[in-house]
Image (tube, rainbow, N blue to C red):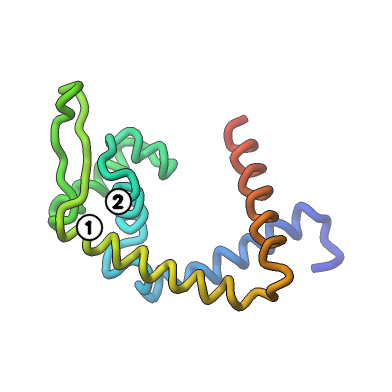
Amino acid sequence: MTDMNPSKELRERIRKLEKELGVLKDSQLSCCGVTLAQCHALVEIGRAGRISLSELARLLNLENSSMSRTVDKLVTKGMVKRDIDPVDRRYLVINLTARGEEVYRKIEENMNLFFEKIYLALPAEKRNDVLESLNVLLASVEKVRDE
């Protein structure tokens, strides 16, 4: 890859990282038997406590209709519930049920353990550099996305 221009090399390294991390969704290690989309939704709902459908869709960079289908499946599985917002009855708020809370905690536990192993596999003197570089990369991605 050394003969590539830097932007193509960046693309290829990110593509490879995505592929390597994609093993997680195939193994279901991280998502405790739910789909990847449902996994992401459970994590965001769990972290927020309660959230509107539109805010959840925004956080996950999805259309409201796609997010609504994902939430519907989680409702059917008994992992989330939808309620009318007591402040503004035009909106629905979504929160975890006891079963959803249990799955959310298991997802968080599995992912924290997995990424702790990755972090500890990094050379100790490079760990802060990796985190700083990821922050710079993420900020650049967000800047380009918002243009």
Quadrant of the image occupied by residue 94: top left
User: Which residue is labeled 1 in the image?
Assistant: 101
Task: Give the side of residue 18 with respect to residue 97, left or right.
Answer: right
In the figure, 43 relative to 114: above or below?
above
Residue located at (68% from left, 56% from top): 11
As helix, strand or loop, the secondary structure at mark 1 comes to: helix
Residue located at (72% from left, 68% from top): 126
Q: Does the residue at mark 2 contact the one at mark 1 (Cβ under 8 Å)?
A: yes
The tag on residue 46 is 2
The amino acid marked with disc number 1 is: Glu
Quadrant of the image occupied by residue 93: top left
Q: How many marks?
A: 2
Instruction: Measure the alpha-carbon separation of dots 2 and 1.
Output: 7 Å
Residue located at (32% from left, 33% from top): 54
Depth check, front residue: 110 or 35: 110
Q: Quadrant of the N terminus?
A: bottom right
The tag on residue 114 is none
Percent x, y of residue 122? 65, 74
As helix, strand or loop, the secondary structure at mark 2 comes to: helix
Q: Residues within 10 Å of mark 1 (few under 14, many from 20)?
A: some
> Which of the two discs, 2 and 1, labels the residue nearer the N terminus?
2
Residue located at (67% from left, 67% from top): 127
Depth check, front residue: 133 or 58: 133
Percent x, y of residue 51? 28, 38
Percent x, y of residue 44? 35, 48
Q: Residues within 10 Å of mark 2 (few under 14, many from 20)?
A: many
In the figure, 132 relative to 55: above or below?
below
Q: Quadrant of the C terminus?
A: top right
The amino acid marked with disc number 2 is: Gly
